[in-house]
Amino acid sequence: RERMQELLEKMKVHTFVGADSSRNMILKARLNMAMHGLPKAPIFWVDNSLVSSSLEAEHYDLVITNPPFGSGSVKNTTEEGKDILDYYISGIDEYGKPKKTGLCLGANPNAKGVWKRVNSTDQAVLFIDRYLQLLKPGGRLIVVLPDGILSNSSYKHVREYIMGKKNEITGEFEGGRAVVKAVVSLPTVTFQLSGTGAKTSFLYIKKKEHDNEKQEAVFMAVADEIGFDVKSKHEVQLGNDRNDLLKIVEAYKKGIK
């Protein structure tokens, strides 16, 4: 029993890691963790999560996050933007093809399928690459994304980068760095109090452990209500009976093989 308690205390200190560029959010996160019995959990400030060396590649089993919404694109018109885009093409080989490892979403493919660096891109796209970099093989990612990345034709290469291209003959997805487990659509009220009414969904994926992992059927659901509404810039609780996410979680769990 003493050994188990010792392990639990180590987990509290070393298992949960958080990073943000907002000092205010870091303070809130630290207070939240302390209130849940984890006052020493490493929640720290970083200048830029896209490139910070404080976050180690292939170090994490689970990443739960969201990229910044509405904060603009990364552009090569600034020195910082150019450096970031250069960093995010390190996984493109000399023939303009993505390698099996490395960062690639600072580029996209032209009509001939050759990947070339872009002049600008949505930060959310680069963050997807970053999350995959941080995960261990077999690690899981749950991320909130603008719906455009999941549906717009201009982001088709991002979706194929994640799950591979569909072979129209076999129906199998070939290539890709992850297996998509679930996509759940969220109502526009979800982040309204945070200043955005963007239509979003959360994406649940597993980073591949080997090339032969197959993409299976994807669990998909729509949450019309999430237990609260926003009126006059205030949250109004609706109760668990009007929280579709609880039902969606139960439905997902029943479908797990």
Image (spheres, grey):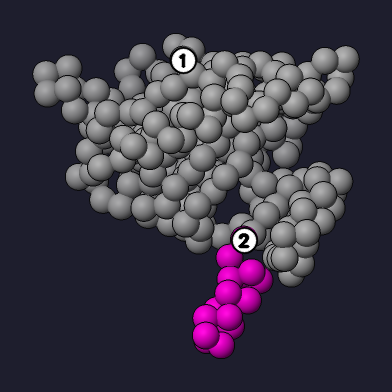
Q: Which residue is mark 2?
A: 16
Q: Amino acid at mark 1?
A: Ser
Position of residue 157 relative to residue 17, above or below, is above
x, y percent for residue 157:
41, 23
Q: Is residue 5 left or right of residue 254?
A: right
Element at badge 2? loop
Q: Which residue is mark 1?
A: 151
Picture quadrant where residue 145 is located:
top right
Q: Is residue 47 left or right of residue 137?
A: right
Q: Residue furthest bottom?
A: 2
Quadrant housing the C terminus: top left
Foreground mark, 2 or 1, reads: 2
Instruction: Looking at the image, tell me whether mark 2 or mark 1 is earlier in sequence order.
Output: 2
At a point 71% along the width and 65% down the height, the residue shown is 38
x, y percent for residue 185:
52, 21
At a point 44% along the width and 11% down the height, the residue shown is 153
Q: What is the C-alpha distance between the residues marked 2 and 1? A: 32 Å
